[in-house]
Amino acid sequence: MKKIEAIIRPEAFQALRQRLDDEGIGGLTVSEVAGCGQQQGQEGIFRGSKFEIKLYPKVKVELVVDNDQADTIIDIILSTCSTDQVGDGKIFVSSIEEVYRIRTGEQGRTALI
């Protein structure tokens, strides 16, 4: 199993959610996060005072899937969320050793469904 974590622009989330639904992928966790990478923040002015914005709002989407689904999901994220601009985000993929469904005690692939 693989865990896919994608940090994306908030405005890309609805399109990504629709594409995942179209592929029959329904189980995911979504969090509102903030961060910066190459963007390094920007300077703003409020009532004549300058201030620095160090973090940008992002959405973190997490999915745990079978190994054979990982490449498809990564391709969906890349094609849906890319604007070819700095700040599009990142995808992190890690191996998951085991999954348990708390309610029933099921484990492995059956716990994902």
Image: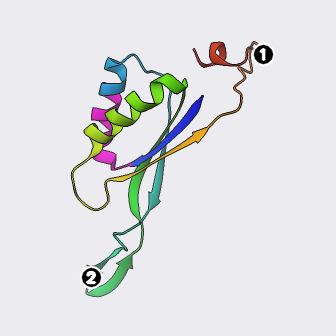
Give the overall secondary structure of the magenta segment.
helix
Queried whether the magenta region covers residue 14, the answer comes back as: yes
Three-letter amino acid code at the position of disc 2: Arg
User: Is 30 placed left or right of 88 in the picture?
Assistant: right
Q: Magenta residues, as a range?
A: 8-17
Q: What residue is pinned by disc 1?
A: 105
Q: Quadrant of the C terminus?
A: top right
Q: Residues within 10 Å of mark 2 (few under 14, many from 20)?
A: few
Compared with 108, 36 (above or below) is below
Q: Position of residue 45 (x, y in %)?
A: 27, 81
Q: Position of residue 19 (x, y in %)?
A: 30, 26
Give the foreground label among 1 and 2.
1
User: Is 103 placed left or right of 11 in the picture?
Assistant: right
Labels 1 & 2 near each other (Cβ < 8 A):
no
Compared with 108, 40 (above or below) is below
Three-letter amino acid code at the position of disc 1: Gly
Residue 27's label in the rendered image is none
Queried whether the magenta region covers residue 74, the answer comes back as: no
Residue displayed at 42% across by 31% down: 71
> Going from the N terminus, do you reach mark 1 or mark 2 first?
2
Q: Position of residue 109 (x, y in %)?
A: 63, 16
Q: Secondary structure at mark 1?
A: loop
Choose between 52 and 80: the one closer to the eye: 80
Q: Secondary structure at mark 2?
A: loop
Q: Quadrant of the N terminus?
A: top right
Q: What residue is pinned by disc 2?
A: 47
User: Is 10 placed left or right of 3 in the picture?
Assistant: left
